[in-house]
Image: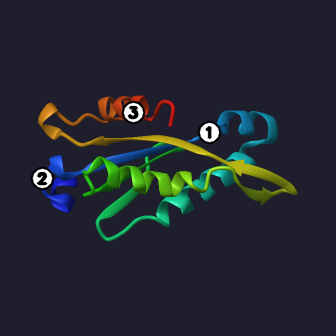
Amino acid sequence: QVESAYGATEKVAVIYWDVNNLKKINDSMGHEYGDQLILTAGKSIKAITTKSSTAYRVGGDEFVLLTNRTDLAEAEAIRNRVFSHNEETVTFGGEELPVSLHGGIMKLNTARGLRYSKLFTELVEAGRGN
């Protein structure tokens, strides 16, 4: 699917985001509050998609965006547009919840074999500290 949408896979960057503190919110306030964080994060990511990118929710609070922007500076600019909304709040149940994401970037290379578990591990590692 990636090759049919983007052509050669070495021309695809994968940008990854994960919602910060979701487990803490779920455990202390309830899953309906955590769901609001996930929905808000998803909307922020969807808002930056273009004709040359596609966003997916790939896990409970993990999102990826596939884009043909393989220049690292361009991919970082896309990622940072979502980061620019970090700490904005969403109101739910009378509570103000800060929405914060972290994430990483990598170029997709199917020559190494494309396994989701390996790709996901590499994306998480790329996002440490971001």
Taking 50 as reference, is 115 above or below it? Answer: above
Q: Tell me if residue 116 can be seen.
A: yes
Of marks 3 and 2, the one in the foreground = 3
Spot occupied by residue 123 in the image (x, y as percentages of width and height): 38, 35
Judging by the rendered image, the residue that carries numbered circle 1 is 20
Amino acid bearing label 3: Ala
Amino acid bearing label 1: Asn
Q: Real-space Cα distance between discs 3 and 1?
A: 16 Å
Farthest front residue in view:
73
Taking 47 as reference, is 40 above or below it? Answer: above
Q: Real-space Cα distance between discs 1 and 2?
A: 33 Å
Question: Is 107 on the left-hand or right-hand side of 8?
Answer: right
Tell me the colour scheme of the image. Answer: rainbow
Secondary element at tag 2? loop
Taking 123 as reference, is 91 above or below it? Answer: below
Q: Pick whichever, 50 or 86, lies toward us.
A: 86
Q: Tell me if residue 56 can be seen.
A: no
Judging by the rendered image, the residue that carries numbered circle 2 is 8
Judging by the rendered image, the residue that carries numbered circle 3 is 126
Amino acid bearing label 2: Ala
